[in-house]
Amino acid sequence: MSRRIPASIGILLMAAGCGDGGAGNAGFENPDSPVNITLAPENTGDGWTPSTPAAEGLDTRQLGSIFDSIRDGHFPGVDSMVVVRNQRLVAEGYFNGFDRDTVHELRSTGKSFISTLAGIAIDQGLMGLDDTLSQHIPDFDGYRNMDADKRAITLRHLLDMSSGLDCNDWDSSSPGNEEKMYDSRDWIKFMLDLRMIAAPGARANYCTGGVVLLAEAVSQRSGMALENYAQQWLFGPLNIQDSVWRRSPDGRATGATGFGLRPRDAAKLGALFANEGVWNGTRIVSENWVATTRERPTSLRNQGYGSLWWKSRFTHGTGQIEAVYTSGNGGNFVFTIPSHELVVAFTGSNYNTERSDTPLQIMPLILSALP
């Protein structure tokens, strides 16, 4: 089920987008919870088939040393690491007062979940990738600064961060910066009132508000609240029982940031895409949508980007390994390495620091555990 954030925590999360502000997971962790590392995870009935690193062809000693390094403080602020190989859960570790059952705020990792919901809606024929946003938002022409370019924004442009709206979360002076959106009473109106600064598709700027618009399109076309659509078509099939949604002032779930899951459940998204859209024998998204998420139509900060997923390459042996991953401020990542059926999920609380990218430093160490 989805659940609302308790009021005291919700106020904190409302300020905790993937940008500058926020207190992250305050109120979720338990200071008395001990560090818990296991290379033989328990079967809790949550849908995972447990195994061990050795059984799935990973170097147990190497993985164990990485967990030990996190425990010993060499990678501060990493709250959990979950490792999956061949669709089996092979290792997990929890730190800093977090445990297996703690719902952790994932920041912009939520964007890749919204992408998945959009993909499901496209698979169902509710919308098309190249549909204009105006087809799915009521009274679209009534918003300010309306012009032909704004009418030409497609769902593909929102998925690739190339809408052309005057929105850049990495520029505090940008009129569409997410922190300004959070201060508004109507996030949809705030975004659609923005002027255009480029033709759709001409440039890419990181824009959380564009994902809010995409989520609204999914809700409008499905005729369901976003969290209900997610529960029926994604969380239910993935056996995800609990979630936290960031809500706009009018109460609508958005998912673009401030979205929370248990670490084991976050890793399920990676496993779904590493397995070409199938989870435990059930197809949830099409192979076509999985292929779309692996494309690199745009670039942000010199990294491939598209369909609200990041793309990168890691060195392994004498070659390069393709990685497709989510990224949330604080160190909240889900990495998929399709060529090796490897998934690694991290949660972290390194908000707004250079340590937010710590999982990118840990991943090469994990890849060294591969044959």
Image: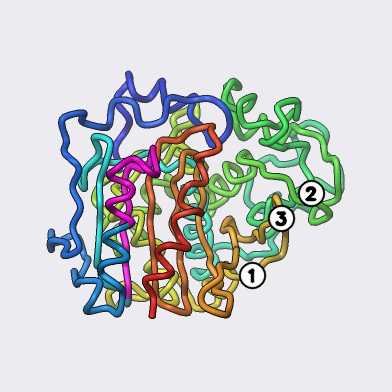
Are there few (<14), some (14-19), or many (20+) residues within 10 Å of tag 1?
some
Tag 2, which secondary structure? helix
Q: Nearer the viewer, residue 58 or 5?
A: 58
Label disc, if present, on residue 331 of the rendered structure: none
Circle 3/circle 2 CB separation < 8 Å: no
Quadrant hosting residue 335 = bottom left
In front: mark 1 or mark 2? 1
Task: Locate the C terminus and report the quarter of the image it occupies.
Answer: bottom left
Whether 133 is drawn above or below 99: the answer is below
**Residue at screen point 50% across, 41% down:** 356
In front: mark 1 or mark 3? 3
**Residue at screen point 66% across, 61% down:** 304
Are there few (<14), some (14-19), or many (20+) residues within 10 Å of tag 3?
few
- Cα distance, mark 3 to mark 2? 29 Å
Whether 181 is drawn above or below 328: the answer is above
Q: Where residue 275 sits: x, y (%)?
A: 40, 76
**Residue at screen point 36% across, 49% down:** 228
Tag 1, which secondary structure? loop
Quadrant hosting residue 309 = bottom right
Question: Mark 3 is on which residue type?
Answer: Asn
Residue under pointer 1: 295
Question: Mark 2 is on which residue type?
Answer: Arg
Residue under pointer 2: 151
Q: Where residue 280 sits: x, y (%)?
A: 27, 74
Residue under pointer 3: 302
